[in-house]
C-alpha cells in the first residue's frame, strides 16, 4: 500500500516537473494580459533543442538552456503579432502550436529514435527548481513592485500606461519569459522524463499546462500543486486501468478547466480571483 | 479676453496657459484660451458642453497637444507630452472614469510604478506614506482595502492620493461631483480646502453653480472654446454666471402653428434608473409628450439624458416607474416592443449604434423593420422590395450615395443621419425620440433635419428631442424640460423660456 | 469591407510570404526551396494524386463552411475537431448498434452525425451565453474531451477485433458505407453535401431573416440590440449549423474513408484545426470556402509527397499551416488599419475603426 502511494508521488513529481515549468510560464504570460495558446509548440521546440544539444555535446543542462532560448524565440513570434500588430491572440497561439510541431518534426528528423546518452534523472534538480520557482514567482507576483506592475498590466493596462509604465514592454517580457519556461518544460520531457526524441513528443502536455494555469486561477503556487497533481492523476489512470478505464480520468483536467471558468463567471464579483480583466484584449491607447 | 485682475494678486501664477488653441476635425475646441491658476486657490472652469473645458484640461494633462499657445509653470514654458510628463511637472488629474485596478488594494494601486518605493514589499512603505497624507488632507482610506469594495467617493480619494503621492502640486478634477452624493461632495470640498492651505492649486471643471460658489476662489467661464471672463467667486452672482455660460444671442424663432393633438405620444411617470456605474441616473422623471408637439430636453451632458432615452427606447432597465408609448405600456420590455408600439429612435451615437457600417445602405435602411412585410416574406428577405424601398428613400431624403449597395460607413456623417432619419421616419411613427440628431453636422444637414422633424410634428407625431445645443432646443421645441442630476428642474413653454432662465436650471436651480 | 480585389491581393500576399518563409526553413534543412516546391506541385497536382486532394477537401469544406458561419457571428469556434469526432461517433452508433434498416442507414447516419456535432457545438455556446465562458477555451477543451471519449469507446465498449496494437470497432456493414468515385477515395455524397451546404449557408446569410440577424450581430452588437435582435437565438442557430457541419465531416470520414471508428488521432488528422485556416482565408464567404478548402487540401496532400519524395516528415505540412495562419492574421492590419508608427515605442496611432476581428475576444462582452 505504502509502496503504491510512494510510487504515485514519485510519478507525480516526475511528470509534474516539465508541466510545472510550462504552466508557471503561461501563468506569468497571461497575468500580463496575453493569452499564449502556443505552449505545445514552444514545448516541442524546446524538447527538440534540448535533445539535439544534449546529444551532440553530452551536456543536458546546456540543452535545457538552449531549450529556454528556443521557447523564448518562438514566443516572440507570437508577441510581435499580438502585441504590436494586435492580431487575434487565440488564433496566433494556435498557429504557433502548429508551426512548432511542424518545425520540430522537420528539424528533428535525423534525431529520431536515437537514445540519449547523458540524461537527467526524472526527478532532478529541476524538480526542486520547479517548486522553488513556483514559490519565487508567487512572491514576486504578490509582494514586489514588479509583480504589481505585471498584474496591473493584465487587469487595467490603461491605468499602467497613464502612470508612465510601458505596458508593451511588460507584455513582451512576460510572453518571452513564458516561452522560455515552456521551452525548459519541453526540454525536460526529452532529456529527463522520457529521454528520446520523436515528433510530437509533447503529446498534448502543452494544452494540459494551459489548463493548469487556468484552473490554478493564475496563481503560481496553485499551478505547482496542479502540475504535480496532474502527474499523479495521470499515473493513477494507468495504475487503475484494470478497474477503471483510463480515459475518463484523463478527460478530467479539461472538464475541470471548463468548470472553473463557469464557476468564476457565475460568481461574477471582481473580488473573486478570475481571469485578469484585460486577458486576451490588445491594448490600444486612447480606448478607455 | 484678458482675465479680470484680482487686486489681491501676490506672486506670479503657479500655472498659466497662454493663447492655447486646439482644433479637432470640424470644431475649434479651444480658441486662444488664456487662464492662470495660482498656488493656494481653487479655480473653477465653468461652461456648457462643447465649451472646451475638457479639452483644455486634457492638454494640461498631456493627453492632447495644443496646436498653438504655451503652458508656463512658475513662469517657465514647459512641454507636456503625456500624462507621465504631466506628473513629472507636478500636474495631476483625477479623471471622470477612474484608472484603477479594481481587484488590487489601494496601496497596490498607488504604488504602481511609483519611483522611490522599495522593490520588496512596496505596499508597506506606501501604506505608511498614505497614512501620513490622509492625516494631512483628510483623505481617510484603508490602504489594504481592495478597490472594488470602496465606494465611488473613496475610489476618487484613491485617485487623488495617487496624484499627491507623485508630487502633484496642481490637481485637476473633471466633474468630480457627478458621481457623488451631496454629503460626499461636501467631504470632497473639505479636502480641497485643505489642499489650498497646503499650497496646492486645484482646477475643477463643473457646470454646477452651487459648487462653484461653495468652494471656488476664482471662476473662468468658457463658451464655444473661448474664455468669456475670469471672475472672483465672491463677487459673481448666479445670473451673471449663467448668462456668461449660455450667451445672450438673439435667435430667430420660427413662427409655428400650435399643432397639439389629442393623446399622449409618450408618457413617462416617476422614472428611476441607474447608470452603468450603478448610481441613480434618473430620479423620478415624469413628463409627457403629446401628439403634434415637440418637447425638448435640455441640460449639460451627463445629467441623465442618455439614460432617459435608453429607458424609453427599451435599451435600459428602469428600476422604478413606467413608460407608455402611444398608450401602450413598454416599461422594461425591449427595443423591439417599443418599435412595435410605434416609436422611432434616432440614436445618440449614429456611427456606433445607428448603423452597421460594413453593411449596405439598403440593408441599413431596413435595419429595424427587416422582419416585417414587405421586407420579409416568411423566413426570407424580399430583396426586390428592399431595393425598391432603398431607392425611394435615397431619393426622398436626399441621401448622397453612389448607390444602395455601398457600405454605410462610406457615407459622410450628414448622409448617415439622413439614412437613419429615412429609416426611422418612413414608418410614420407616432413617437420620435431624437437624441442629439444634428451633433457634428453642417448647416444644410442640420436645417434639413430640422424641417423633417417639424414636418412630422405637423403630421401629428410627438417628438422628444434631446440636445446639448440650446439654440436647437429653443428653435424647435414647443415645451422645454431641463434635466439636472436626473431630475426635471422645470418644464416651460418655449415661448416663455429665455436662455438665462434655462441656463440657471441647467446649473441646478429649480424653475 | 474593403473591396474584394484588395482582400484577394492581401491574402495572396500573405500566402506567398508564408511559402517564402517556409522555403527559408527548407533551405536551412538542406533542401532547395524551389526544387522542393516544384516536387510538391508536381506531386499533388497530377492525375493520380489529385483525387487525394479531393479526399482531403471534403472534411475541410464541411467544417470550413461551418466555421465561416461561426466566425461571422464572432464565435471563435476552435472545436471543429471535437465536433467532427462526435459526428463520427454518432454515425458509428447508427451503423453498428442501431436497429435502423439497411436502406435508411446512410441518411440516418448523416442526420445523427449532424446532431452529434451540433450538440457538441451547442454546449460551448450555452456556456458562453449563460456563464460567459470564453469559447476559445471551452471549444478547445471539448476537443480533448471528445478525443478521450472516442478513445474510451474504441478501446472499451465498442472494441472490435484488434490488429497490431491498434484498436478499432467492427467494420461497418455494407449499407453503412459511402460509395466512392471509382479508383479514388472521394466519397462523393459527402462532397455533394458539402457543396450544397456552402451554397446553402451563403443563401442563409444573404437572403434570409436569420442570416440578416447573424450578420448584424456579428458586425455590430450595439446596433443589433438597437435593432431588436436576440443575441442568444442567433448564436444558438449558428452553432447548431457549424457543429452540425463538422459532424457531417466526421460521418464522411468514418463511413467513407475508414468504414469503422478508429483511434481518434487517425480519424481527424487535424482537419478541424486546418478548417480554421480554411475559414479565415475565405474571409467570411461560404462560397469562397470551396476554393480555400481545395487549397488546404493540396497542403495536406503535400505531406505525403514530402514524406516520399523529399524524406521529410509528413508533419511538415504543419509548418505551412502555421506560417500561413501567422501571415494571414498578421496581414489583417493591412486590411483594416492605416498605421502610423510613433517614435519611442509608443502605441501606433491608428486611424480607421477596428473591426471586432482584430480585437481579440472577451469572455463576456464579445
Image (cartoon, coloured by chain):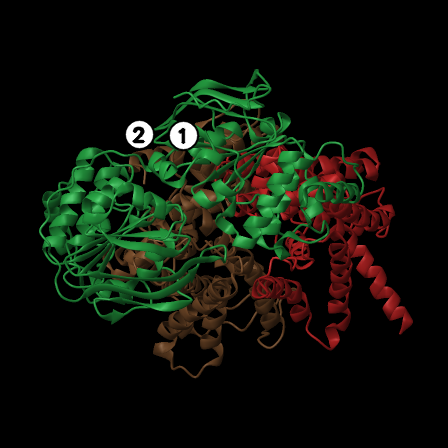
Q: Tag 1, which chain? A: C
State whether residue A230 is above or below residue B485: below
Q: How far from the left and from the top, in percent, is residue A190?
A: 75, 46
Q: How far from the left and from the top, in percent, is residue B264?
A: 20, 65
Q: Could you tell me how many numbered marks the image carries?
A: 2
Which chain did the renderer colour red? A
| Left or right of residue B78: residue C68 | left
Residue C249 visible, this angle:
yes
Depth order, front residue of A226/C68: A226
Which chain did the renderer colour brown? C
Q: Residue furthest right?
A: A2
User: Which quadrant would residue C152 be assigned to in this image?
Assistant: bottom right
Q: Residue at x 90, y 69 (%)?
A: A3
Secondary-structure class at tag 2: loop
Q: Tag 2, which chain? A: B
Residue C361 visible, this angle:
no
Depth order, front residue of A149/B447: B447
Q: Which residue is mark 1?
A: C338
Amino acid at each position: 500500500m505504502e509502496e503504491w502511494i510512494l510510487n504515485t508521488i514519485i510519478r507525480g513529481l516526475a511528470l509534474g516537473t516539465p508541466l510545472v515549468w510550462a504552466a508557471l510560464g503561461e501563468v506569468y504570460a497571461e497575468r500580463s494580459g496575453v493569452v499564449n495558446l502556443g505552449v505545445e509548440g514552444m514545448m516541442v521546440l524546446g524538447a527538440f533543442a534540448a535533445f539535439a544539444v544534449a546529444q551532440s555535446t553530452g551536456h543536458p543542462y546546456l540543452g535545457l538552456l538552449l531549450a529556454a532560448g528556443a521557447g523564448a524565440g518562438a514566443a516572440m513570434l507570437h508577441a510581435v503579432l499580438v502585441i504590436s500588430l494586435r492580431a487575434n491572440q487565440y488564433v496566433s497561439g494556435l498557429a504557433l502550436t502548429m508551426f512548432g510541431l511542424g518545425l520540430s518534426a522537420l528539424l528533428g528528423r535525423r534525431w529520431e529514435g536515437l537514445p540519449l546518452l547523458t540524461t537527467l534523472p526524472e526527478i532532478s534538480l529541476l524538480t526542486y527548481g520547479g517548486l522553488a520557482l513556483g514559490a519565487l514567482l508567487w512572491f514576486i507576483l504578490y509582494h514586489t513592485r514588479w509583480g504589481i506592475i505585471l498584474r496591473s498590466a493584465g487587469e487595467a493596462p490603461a491605468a499602467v500606461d497613464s502612470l508612465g509604465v510601458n505596458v508593451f514592454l511588460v507584455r513582451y517580457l512576460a510572453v518571452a519569459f513564458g516561452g522560455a519556461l515552456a521551452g525548459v518544460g519541453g526540454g525536460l520531457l526529452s532529456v529527463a522524463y522520457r529521454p528520446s526524441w520523436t515528433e510530437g513528443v509533447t503529446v498534448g502536455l502543452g494544452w494540459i499546462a494551459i489548463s493548469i494555469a487556468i484552473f490554478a486561477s493564475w496563481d503560481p503556487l496553485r499551478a505547482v500543486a496542479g502540475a504535480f497533481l496532474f502527474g499523479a492523476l495521470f499515473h493513477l489512470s494507468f495504475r487503475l486501468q484494470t478497474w477503471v478505464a483510463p480515459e475518463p480520468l484523463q478527460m478530467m483536467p479539461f472538464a475541470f478547466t471548463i468548470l472553473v471558468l463557469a464557476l468564476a463567471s457565475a460568481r461574477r464579483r471582481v473580488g473573486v480571483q478570475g481571469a485578469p480583466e484585460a486577458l486576451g484584449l490588445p491594448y490600444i491607447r486612447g480606448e478607455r | 479676453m484678458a482675465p479680470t485682475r484680482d487686486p489681491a494678486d501676490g506672486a506670479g501664477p503657479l500655472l498659466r496657459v497662454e493663447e492655447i488653441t486646439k482644433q479637432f476635425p470640424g470644431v475649434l475646441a479651444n480658441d486662444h484660451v488664456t487662464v492662470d491658476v495660482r498656488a493656494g486657490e481653487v479655480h473653477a472652469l465653468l461652461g456648457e458642453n462643447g465649451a472646451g473645458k475638457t479639452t483644455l484640461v486634457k492638454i494640461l494633462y498631456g493627453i492632447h497637444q495644443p496646436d498653438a499657445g504655451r503652458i508656463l509653470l512658475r513662469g517657465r514654458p514647459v512641454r507636456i507630452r503625456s500624462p507621465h510628463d504631466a506628473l513629472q511637472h507636478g500636474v495631476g488629474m483625477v479623471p471622470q472614469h477612474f484608472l484603477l485596478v479594481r481587484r488590487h488594494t489601494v496601496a497596490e494601486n498607488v504604488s504602481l510604478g511609483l519611483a522611490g518605493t522599495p522593490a520588496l514589499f512596496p505596499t508597506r512603505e506606501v501604506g505608511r506614506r498614505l497614512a501620513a497624507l490622509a492625516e494631512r488632507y483628510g483623505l481617510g482610506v484603508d490602504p489594504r482595502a481592495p478597490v472594488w469594495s470602496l465606494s465611488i467617493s473613496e475610489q476618487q480619494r484613491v485617485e487623488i492620493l495617487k496624484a499627491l503621492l507623485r508630487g502633484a502640486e496642481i490637481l485637476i478634477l473633471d466633474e468630480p461631483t457627478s458621481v457623488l452624493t451631496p454629503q460626499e461632495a461636501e467631504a470632497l470640498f473639505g479636502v480641497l480646502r485643505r489642499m489650498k492651505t497646503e499650497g496646492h492649486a486645484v482646477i475643477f471643471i463643473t457646470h454646477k453653480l452651487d459648487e462653484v460658489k461653495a468652494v471656488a476662489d476664482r471662476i473662468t467661464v468658457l463658451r464655444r472654446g473661448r474664455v468669456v471672463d475670469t471672475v472672483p467667486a465672491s463677487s459673481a452672482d448666479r445670473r451673471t454666471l449663467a448668462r456668461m455660460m449660455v450667451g445672450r444671442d438673439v435667435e430667430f424663432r420660427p413662427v409655428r402653428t400650435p399643432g397639439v393633438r389629442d393623446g399622449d405620444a409618450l408618457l413617462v411617470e416617476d422614472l428611476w434608473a441607474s447608470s452603468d456605474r450603478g448610481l441613480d441616473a434618473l430620479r423620478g422623471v415624469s413628463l409627457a409628450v403629446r401628439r403634434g408637439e415637440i418637447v425638448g430636453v435640455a441640460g449639460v451632458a451627463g445629467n441623465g439624458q442618455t439614460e432617459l432615452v435608453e429607458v424609453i427606447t427599451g435599451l435600459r432597465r428602469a428600476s422604478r416607474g413606467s413608460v407608455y408609448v402611444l398608450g401602450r405600456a413598454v416599461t422594461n420590455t425591449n427595443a423591439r416592443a417599443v418599435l412595435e408600439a410605434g416609436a422611432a429612435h434616432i440614436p445618440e451615437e449614429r456611427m456606433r449604434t445607428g448603423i452597421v457600417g460594413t453593411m449596405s445602405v439598403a440593408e441599413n435602411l431596413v435595419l429595424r423593420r427587416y422582419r416585417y412585410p414587405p421586407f420579409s416574406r416568411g423566413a426570407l428577405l424580399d430583396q426586390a422590395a428592399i431595393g425598391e424601398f432603398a431607392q425611394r428613400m435615397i431619393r426622398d431624403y436626399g441621401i448622397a450615395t453612389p448607390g444602395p449597395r455601398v457600405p454605410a460607413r462610406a457615407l459622410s456623417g450628414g448622409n448617415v443621419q439622413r439614412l437613419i432619419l429615412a429609416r426611422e421616419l418612413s414608418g410614420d411613427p407616432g413617437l420620435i425620440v431624437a437624441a442629439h440628431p444634428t451633433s457634428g453636422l453642417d448647416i444644410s444637414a442640420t436645417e434639413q433635419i430640422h424641417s423633417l422633424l417639424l414636418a412630422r410634428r405637423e403630421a401629428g407625431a410627438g417628438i422628444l428631442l434631446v440636445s446639448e445645443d440650446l439654440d436647437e432646443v429653443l428653435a424647435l421645441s414647443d415645451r422645454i424640460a431641463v434635466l439636472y442630476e436626473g431630475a426635471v428642474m422645470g418644464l416651460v413653454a418655449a415661448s416663455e423660456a429665455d436662455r438665462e432662465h434655462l441656463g440657471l436650471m441647467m446649473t441646478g436651480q429649480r424653475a | 469591407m474593403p473591396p474584394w480585389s484588395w482582400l484577394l491581393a492581401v491574402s495572396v500576399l500573405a500566402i506567398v510570404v508564408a511559402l517564402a518563409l517556409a522555403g527559408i526553413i527548407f533551405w536551412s534543412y538542406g533542401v532547395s526551396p524551389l526544387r522542393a516546391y516544384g516536387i510538391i506541385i508536381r506531386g499533388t497536382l497530377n492525375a493520380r494524386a489529385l483525387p487525394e486532394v479531393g479526399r482531403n477537401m471534403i472534411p475541410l469544406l464541411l467544417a470550413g463552411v461551418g466555421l465561416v458561419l461561426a466566425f461571422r457571428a464572432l464565435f471563435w469556434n476552435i472545436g471543429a475537431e471535437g465536433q467532427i469526432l462526435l459526428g463520427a461517433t454518432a454515425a458509428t452508433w447508427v451503423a453498428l448498434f442501431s436497429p435502423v434498416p439497411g436502406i435508411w442507414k446512410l441518411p440516418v447516419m448523416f442526420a445523427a452525425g449532424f446532431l452529434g456535432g451540433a450538440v457538441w457545438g451547442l454546449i460551448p455556446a450555452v456556456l458562453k451565453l449563460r456563464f460567459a465562458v470564453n469559447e476559445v477555451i471551452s471549444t478547445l477543451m471539448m476537443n480533448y474531451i471528445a478525443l478521450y471519449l472516442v478513445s474510451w469507446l474504441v478501446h472499451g465498449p465498442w472494441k472490435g477485433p484488434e490488429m497490431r496494437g491498434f484498436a478499432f470497432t467492427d467494420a461497418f456493414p455494407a449499407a453503412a458505407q459511402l460509395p466512392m468515385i471509382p479508383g479514388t477515395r472521394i466519397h462523393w455524397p459527402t462532397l455533394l453535401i458539402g457543396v450544397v451546404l456552402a451554397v446553402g449557408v451563403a443563401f442563409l446569410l444573404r437572403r434570409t431573416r436569420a442570416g440578416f440577424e447573424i450578420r448584424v450581430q456579428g458586425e455590430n452588437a450595439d446596433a443589433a440590440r438597437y435593432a431588436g435582435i436576440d443575441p442568444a437565438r442567433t448564436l444558438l442557430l449558428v452553432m447548431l449549423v457549424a457543429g452540425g457541419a463538422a459532424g457531417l465531416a466526421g460521418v464522411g470520414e468514418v463511413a467513407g474513408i475508414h468504414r469503422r471508428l478508429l483511434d481518434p488521432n487517425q480519424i481527424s488528422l487535424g482537419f478541424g484545426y486546418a478548417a480554421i485556416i480554411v475559414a479565415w482565408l475565405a474571409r467570411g464567404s461560404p462560397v469562397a470556402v470551396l476554393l480555400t478548402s481545395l487549397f488546404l487540401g493540396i497542403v495536406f496532400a503535400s505531406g505525403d509527397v514530402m514524406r516520399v519524395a523529399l524524406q521529410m516528415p509528413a508533419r511538415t505540412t504543419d509548418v505551412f499551416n502555421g506560417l500561413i495562419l501567422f501571415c494571414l492574421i498578421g496581414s489583417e492590419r493591412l486590411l483594416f488599419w492605416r498605421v502610423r508608427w510613433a517614435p519611442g515605442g509608443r502605441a501606433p496611432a491608428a486611424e480607421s475603426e477596428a473591426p471586432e476581428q482584430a480585437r481579440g475576444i472577451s469572455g463576456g462582452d464579445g
